Amino acid sequence: RTGHGVHPRGRMDQDETIRLARHAQKIGADGVGVVTPSYFTVDEKAMVEYYKTVCAALPEDFPVYVYVIPQLAHNDVSAETMEKIAAVCKNVVGVKYSFADMRRINDYLQVRGGNFSVVPGADDLFLPCLACGCDGVVSGCSGPFPEAFVNVYKAFQSGDLPPPARPRWRPPSW
């Protein structure tokens, strides 16, 4: 690893997205996260073509994460569509999914027969997502407050997690 990380890229213009992704690769980034087209709704075929075009402009061994943030980008990517993108874009290695939907996260974990990296963007789902098989988290809060995330990750990796807390609410006993 170069230590440069994965650089998120995305613009309203496909050519600008490609230019920025190529720049990230040129300066030594480990990969890029390419956000879905935003503002205008696109269908599945257009979504697959978008990623196919962007990925074809990059070296085949340069990792690309599909960055799905439907609540802000106006476009979603189902697990079925992700499977199609992954089939035609060999350099797509995973998804950064920024919506708190554990069912979708589990569906993404099945892409390419389970050989697909999934990183959530919802901070509060970090530990449950690790338990499901996700690789980590891309978190806004972990930048200024990395210690909590590092501690959770280390505890998960070592198996040194505390037992679940007692429920605070109990059903009435009639």
Image (tube, rainbow, N blue to C red):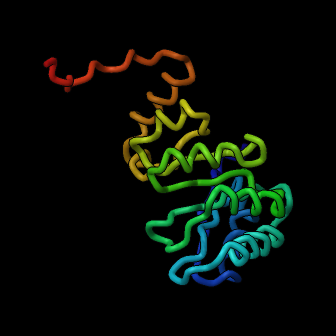
Residue displayed at 56% across by 80% down: 41
Residue under the image location 56 percent in, 40 percent down:
136
Q: Nearer the viewer, residue 142 or 68?
A: 68
Image location of residue 51, percent across then percent down: 73, 70
Q: Quadrant of the C terminus?
A: top left
Q: Is residue 120 left or right of residue 78?
A: left
**Residue depicted at 76% across the width and 75% down the height:** 49
Query: Which quarter shows the N terminus?
Result: top right
> Residue 34 appears at what percent x and percent y?
64, 66
Q: Position of residue 109 (x, y in %)?
A: 65, 43
Left or right: residue 131 compared with residue 57: left
Q: In the displayed structure, does residue 32 sit left or right of residue 131?
A: right
Q: Position of residue 150 (x, y in %)?
A: 47, 33
Q: Residue furthest right?
A: 60
Residue 139 seen in the figure: yes
What residue occupies the far front of the structure in this picture?
A: 174
Residue at the image position 54 percent from the left and 30 percent from the top:
131
Q: Quadrant of residue 50?
A: bottom right
Residue closer to the observer: 153 or 129:
129
Quarter of image, res 82: bottom right
Q: How many marks?
A: 0
Answer above or below: position of 75 versus 173.
Answer: below
Up-down: is 42 above or below 83? below
Q: Is residue 19 visible?
A: no
- Name the residue nearer the viewer: 7 or 46: 46
